[in-house]
Image (spheres, rainbow, N blue to C red):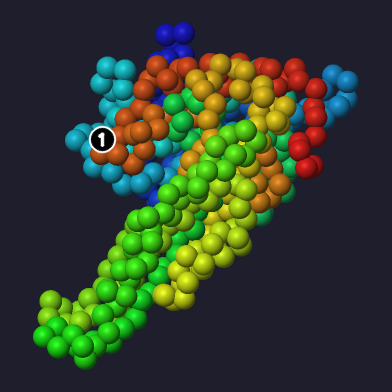
Amino acid sequence: MIAVAERLRDTLLWLCRVPSFTGEEQALCEALLRRLEPVRLAGAVRRHGDSLVVPVSRGLGPDGARRPHVALVGHTDVVPTDHDGPPRVEGDRLYGAGASDMKSGLALMLDLCEADPDLCDDLDLTLVFYAREEGPYLDNELERVLADDPELRGVDLAVCLEPSDNKLSLGACGSIHAELRFTGRTAHSARPWQGDNAIHKAGPLLCDLAALRPRESVCEGFVMRTVTSATLIHGGRGRNVVPDELVLNLNHRFSPDTTLAQAQRDIEALVAGRAAITWRDLSPAAPPCATHPLVALLRDAGVAAVEPKQAWTDVARFAVHGVAAVNFGPGTNAQAHQRNEWTSLPALLQGREILARWLGRVARHPLHPAPGA
């Protein structure tokens, strides 16, 4: 077990030492290609831009039936964070940009195919390393991968290894970023009656937002919350000028019982014509998939807890393509995007044990069609 822990530590350090900020993932993509060259795989690695699809194992079971096909999925990009030193280990913590979100998950993916290839001989396993998750929805390269790689759209379950403290996080809230533009007319601030103050016009809507309370919905037995927040605001021309424009970013997070179109209608009803709306980011929600048989096996493989995901992840992108997906990863969730980001090395080892236990059970599990297939 000590050898496994040291191997995982070294792999995560290697990943953190290759910078891969969003939009700058090429170096890590090529480093992964080189690292995978000696690994026994079921086929050639398929590259889509700066993203990789890795067929680890393929084939039929002993009775000739198709085996379960699962994908372990992780994004290679990280957000820029401030660090007091290079990637390093201090005690049971490993520090580095992306150590938690989500190079810890990538370390497990690599270790499973490098050090334990026999584990996957009785199931179909695909690894997906993809770029640009941390940026805008439309820039995310997983969409290109799903569009260009039809085999990936046929997996029975995708596990996104986002940081979750080894908890099984089900579903995902949808997310909309809407730009609200309030317009008025300039005037000298000594004679405000000659103008129309755009900042003041935004006041009633801001009061309405402050009064909103989370709306709870029960999805497959899990409580998920719809919330709406103003997150950015700017306007004004000068200290002595009545402003003619104010622009506000509204972030609306909605539960899986609401479609993207309905969520847009809800925002329109809230704004009620008081501002012009420009849709900046439209990310759908995803159902929990709690009753999926392979999800049940993961739930019973020793995860730390089972909870709904009160955030957006790429499980929603899989859901759009009809693929069941869940979140599970060893990263320390509270450390994502933090200064001096770190993750727990004992949790990394625990996550490896859970995934290995789960994959062993999947290999012995009779295949059932995914819900809705």
Left or right: where 230 falls relative to 84: right
Up the image or down, 252 lies above or below 301; here it is: below
Name the one closer to the observer, 171 or 48.
Answer: 171
Residue 371 rendering spot, x and y as whole percentages: 76, 38
**What residue appears at the point 45 percent right and 50 percent down from the top-left corner?**
227
Whether residue 325 is visible, yes or no, is no
Up the image or down, 343 lies above or below 21; here it is: above
Q: Residues within 10 Å of mark 1 (few under 14, many from 20)?
A: many
Residue 71: quadrant of the picture: top right
Residue type beneath disc 1: Asn
Residue 61 rendering spot, x and y as whole percentages: 82, 23
**What residue appears at the point 32 percent right and 38 percent down from the top-left corner?**
97
**Secondary structure type for disc 1:** loop
**What residue appears at the point 26 percent right and 80 percent down from the top-left corner?**
197
Residue 124 rendering spot, x and y as whole percentages: 71, 29
Residue 93: quadrant of the picture: top left
Residue identified by numbered label 1: 340
